[in-house]
């Protein structure tokens, strides 16, 4: 006779309970390991954050010290230059003081002679003997005239002057120094120009070709490009955008152009992206937005949605693009549908876009003074980037002007 039924059921229940217990313990252990891994990553991120903050502080302190050194040198040179000018001024003023004293002394002597002569004249009025008047020595008059002429000849104001040639040379040198400083500032523009034409990093080899600089350093190739290496792709432009023949400008038109409906063409948002895509190096572009009341500028992955009304088609609204928008007098930076209101009200005429693949940084600047407007840190760009523009609607003629890439290349040029 076999075991009772309830024994089998109990055994089964015990096995299931044991299995569940073991499964839950394994799952708990797995979650614990995951939590520990996330905690460790969080710790590493905090450490990295601290490292970056410290490194940035060191860099900023070094830059501040250099500017302070420059200011100290300029202040010392100013003091030295002014001391020379002041010493020369004191010498000339002292010389003029001496001349003035001589003239004052001569005036006193003449007034004393005039007083004595007045006494003689008064006596002549009282004494009818006219011979007493002629007793005044005539040679006194001649001596007085000679003395006056001598003092006047030795105190000619035009004989005292500053060294005007020296002063002009000082002004010329200071002006040259000002021009030199202006040519090197804003320092960010100088940095970008140096990146466009050469590189100051230590490298084994470098060569130039068609405006590019290739650097081989630790088996990594860096390419520095500027606006002359990019043009707009008309096959991506919304049908209401007119792209110039050179590919350097986009202009809104009310007319829906009969263009081929290509997969890469934006059909809702007034966007156009560059023909070229970039995946390494550092890049800088300047966009002329003079006279415009609405625009969007930025960069985007090739994967940005092009069709339909989805919000991700707009620049900066999705995870595929980054932009700065100017609308109704306000600036907003966009990425991942997150807006960042910027504290600027001035209508800028040129916007610079600085993209650094090594750092994963995207910075928007006011190009004239190279003043930063906003920076995004992507950490690592995961795909090729295109320059992206939106000139916006014409807004009853108030926003009719084109949006222009400064110094853009022709679509047919060799890049």
Image (spheres, grey):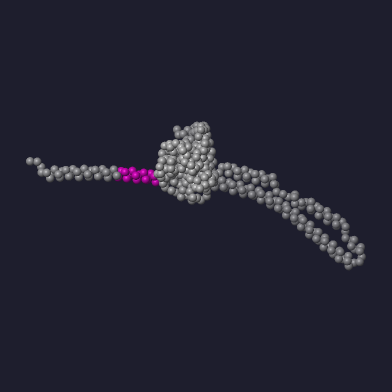
Q: Residue 305: image x %, image y %?
A: 41, 41
Query: At 86% across and 64% down in the image, what residue appears?
Result: 121
Q: Identify which residue, 397 or 281, lies in the foreground.
A: 397
Q: Residue extending furthest left?
A: 1
Q: Is residue 246 magenta?
A: no
Residue 235 visible here? yes
Left or right: residue 302 compared with residue 350: left
Q: Which range of residues does the magenta coloring cover? A: 32-46
Q: Main secondary structure of the magenta part?
A: helix
Residue 117 lies left or right of residue 289; in this view the side is right
- Residue at image position (88%, 67%) is 126
Q: How many marks?
A: 0
Task: Tell me the residue at 88%/65% (across/down).
Answer: 124
Q: Give whichever of 131, 320 is nearer the camera.
A: 320
Q: Is residue 134 left or right of residue 212?
A: right
Quarter holding the N terminus?
top left
Residue at the spot 44% in from the left edge and 49% down from the top edge: 340
x, y (%) of residue 263? Answer: 42, 37
Nearer to the camera, 391 or 238: 238
């Amino acid at each position: 006779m076999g075991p009772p039924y309830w024994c089998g059921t109990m055994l089964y229940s015990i096995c299931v309970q044991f299995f569940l217990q073991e499964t839950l313990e394994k799952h708990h252990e797995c979650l614990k390991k995951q939590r520990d891994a996330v905690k460790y990553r969080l710790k590493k991120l905090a450490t990295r954050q601290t490292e970056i903050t410290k490194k940035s502080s060191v860099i900023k302190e070094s830059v501040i010290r250099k500017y302070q050194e420059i200011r100290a040198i300029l202040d010392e040179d100013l003091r030295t230059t002014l001391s020379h000018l002041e010493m020369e001024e004191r010498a000339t003023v002292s010389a003029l003081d001496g001349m003035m004293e001589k003239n004052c002394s001569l005036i006193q002597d003449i007034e004393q002679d005039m007083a004595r002569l007045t006494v003689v004249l008064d006596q002549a009025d009282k004494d009818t003997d006219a011979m007493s008047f002629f007793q005044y020595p005539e040679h006194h008059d001649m001596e007085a005239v000679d003395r006056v002429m001598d003092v006047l000849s030795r105190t000619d104001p035009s004989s005292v002057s500053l060294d005007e040639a020296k002063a002009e040379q000082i002004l010329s040198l200071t002006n040259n120094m000002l021009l030199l400083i202006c040519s090197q500032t804003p320092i960010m523009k100088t940095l970008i120009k140096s990146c466009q034409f050469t590189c100051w990093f230590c490298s084994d080899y470098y060569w130039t070709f068609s405006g590019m600089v290739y650097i081989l350093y630790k088996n990594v190739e860096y390419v520095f490009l500027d606006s002359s290496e990019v043009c707009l792709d008309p096959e991506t432009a919304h049908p209401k955008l007119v792209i110039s023949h050179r590919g350097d400008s986009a202009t809104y038109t009310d007319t829906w152009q009969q263009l081929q409906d290509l997969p890469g063409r934006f059909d809702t948002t007034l966007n156009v992206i560059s023909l070229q895509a970039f995946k390494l190096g550092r890049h800088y572009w300047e966009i002329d937005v003079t006279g415009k009341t609405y625009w969007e500028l930025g960069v985007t992955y090739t994967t940005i949605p092009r069709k339909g009304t989805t919000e991700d088609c707009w620049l900066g609204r999705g995870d595929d693009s980054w932009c700065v928008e100017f609308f109704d007098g306000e600036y907003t930076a966009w990425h991942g549908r997150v807006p960042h209101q910027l504290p600027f009200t001035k209508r800028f005429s040129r916007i610079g876009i600085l993209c650094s693949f090594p750092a994963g940084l995207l910075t928007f600047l006011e190009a004239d003074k190279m003043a930063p407007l906003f920076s995004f840190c992507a950490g690592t760009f995961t795909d090729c980037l295109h320059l992206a523009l939106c000139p916006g609607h014409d807004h009853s003629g108030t926003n009719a002007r084109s949006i222009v890439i400064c110094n853009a290349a022709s679509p047919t040029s060799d890049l």
